Amino acid sequence: AISHEATYIREHLSHVFTIIDKDCSGSMTLDELEEWMEEENGRVDFQALGIAEGDPWTLFKLLDENAQGVVSQEAFVNGCLKLRGNASGVDMASLRNESRATQELLSMLITRMESLSDAKKRRPSYGSRLGLGSPSRPR
């Protein structure tokens, strides 16, 4: 069961989305979000909803989870609900674990690329493997 407050917040966020979506396309662009956030009402609405005001690009990037360049009304509402308030200890632990896993994967990829690069440097050229020596350059 969703509380009365949660229902109100969802409805308010849906209304805010319709204001931001100036062209009534059903999706919000970064330009539309920037324009709305420059207005006084935009900043007040976010503060009233418990969403820390940040720069539009960062907010848009967080809401555009599929990196499509547009945010649907549902993605806007759900994303804003996730951004309300402070991060919990569970949120922070989850981010640390994801960051650690990403760092380990990146380190493994770098090591693999370096070993492939080293192997390529040690491999003799095609010509020298055929006993032709280095190809001569025309002068």
Image (cartoon, helix red, strand yellow):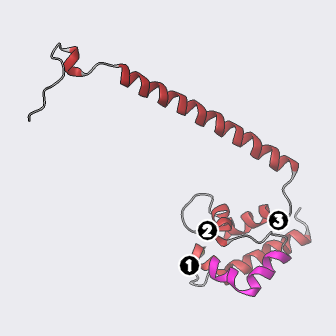
Residue at 90% in and 71% down: 5
Q: How many marks?
A: 3
Pick the front one: 43 or 70 = 43
Residue 38 x/y as whole percent: 68, 83
Q: Which of the labelled discs sits on residue 71, or is there none?
A: 2
Residue 128 x/y as whole percent: 21, 17
Q: Alpha-carbon neighbours of circle 3 within 10 Å: few (<14), some, or many (≥20)?
A: some
Q: Is residue 32 above or below residue 124?
A: below
11 vs 114, left or right, is right
Residue stretch rendered in magenta on the structure? 34-48
69 vs 12, left or right, is left
Q: If you read the primary sequence from the N terminus, does the residue marked by circle 3 or circle 2 appear first?
A: 2
Residue at 56% in and 84% down: 23
- For the question of whether residue 34 can be seen, the reply is yes
Q: If you read the primary sequence from the N terminus, does the residue marked by circle 2 or circle 1 appear first?
A: 1
Q: Is residue 121 above or below residue 4?
A: above
Q: Alpha-carbon neighbours of circle 2 within 10 Å: few (<14), some, or many (≥20)?
A: many
Q: Which of the labelled discs sits on residue 84, or is there none?
A: 3
Residue 31 magenta-drawn? Answer: no
State which mark lies toward you, 3 or 1: 3
Secondary structure of the residue carrying tag 1 is loop
Residue 40 magenta-drawn? Answer: yes
Q: Quadrant of residue 8?
A: bottom right
Pick the front one: 74 or 138 = 138
Q: Which of the labelled discs sits on residue 25, or is there none?
A: 1
Q: Quadrant of the C terminus?
A: top left
